[in-house]
């Protein structure tokens, strides 16, 4: 299992366990699409030696 730590800039943290290196890569590439534009979270996975910031790319769409 790979533990991925997410930390918001207001200080709240969450740890997610993912089963494989590929799952971590997929999470890192798709998670920004779930965050609104202007929202960022810090991400780290010590096992893989990665850390950085994910920035939101999702824009709200109005449905009628």
Image (cartoon, rainbow, N blue to C red):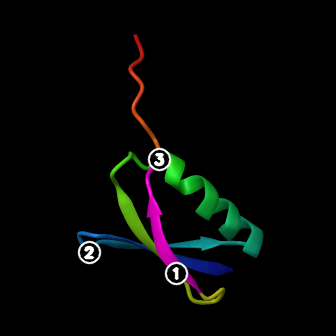
Extreme residue toward the top, this view: 64
Residue 53 among those drawn in magenta: yes
Could you say which is closer to the camera, residue 55 or residue 47?
A: 55
Which mark's residue is nearer the viewer, 2 or 3? 3
Give the quadrant of the N terminus. bottom right
Alpha-carbon span between mark 2 and mark 3 = 21 Å
- Considering the numbered disc 1 on the image, is that residue within a helix, a strand or a loop? strand
Q: Is residue 33 above or below residue 49?
A: above
- At 47% across and 47% down in the image, what residue appears? 57
Alpha-carbon span between mark 2 and mark 1 = 16 Å
| Residue 22, position as x, y percentages in the image | 76, 68
| Residue that numbered label 3 is attached to | 57
Q: Residues within 10 Å of mark 1 (few under 14, many from 20)?
A: some
Residue 52 among those drawn in magenta: yes
Q: Magenta segment, which residues? A: 50-57
- Considering the numbered disc 2 on the image, is that residue within a helix, a strand or a loop? loop
| Residue 46, position as x, y percentages in the image | 57, 89
Say whether disc 3 or disc 1 marks the residue closer to the N-terminus.
1
Mark number for residue 11? 2
- Considering the numbered disc 3 on the image, is that residue within a helix, a strand or a loop? loop
Could you say which is closer to the camera, residue 39 or residue 2?
A: 39
Give the quadrant of the C terminus. top left
Could you say which is closer to the camera, residue 14 or residue 43?
A: 43
Alpha-carbon span between mark 3 and mark 1 = 19 Å
Extreme residue toward the left, this view: 10
């Amino acid at each position: 299992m790979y533990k991925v730590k997410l930390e918001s800039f207001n200080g709240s943290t969450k740890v997610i366990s993912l089963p494989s290196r590929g799952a971590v890569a997929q999470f890192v590439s798709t998670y920004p699409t779930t965050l609104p534009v202007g929202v960022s979270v810090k991400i780290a996975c010590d096992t893989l030696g990665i850390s950085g910031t994910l920035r939101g790319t999702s824009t709200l769409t109005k449905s009628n």
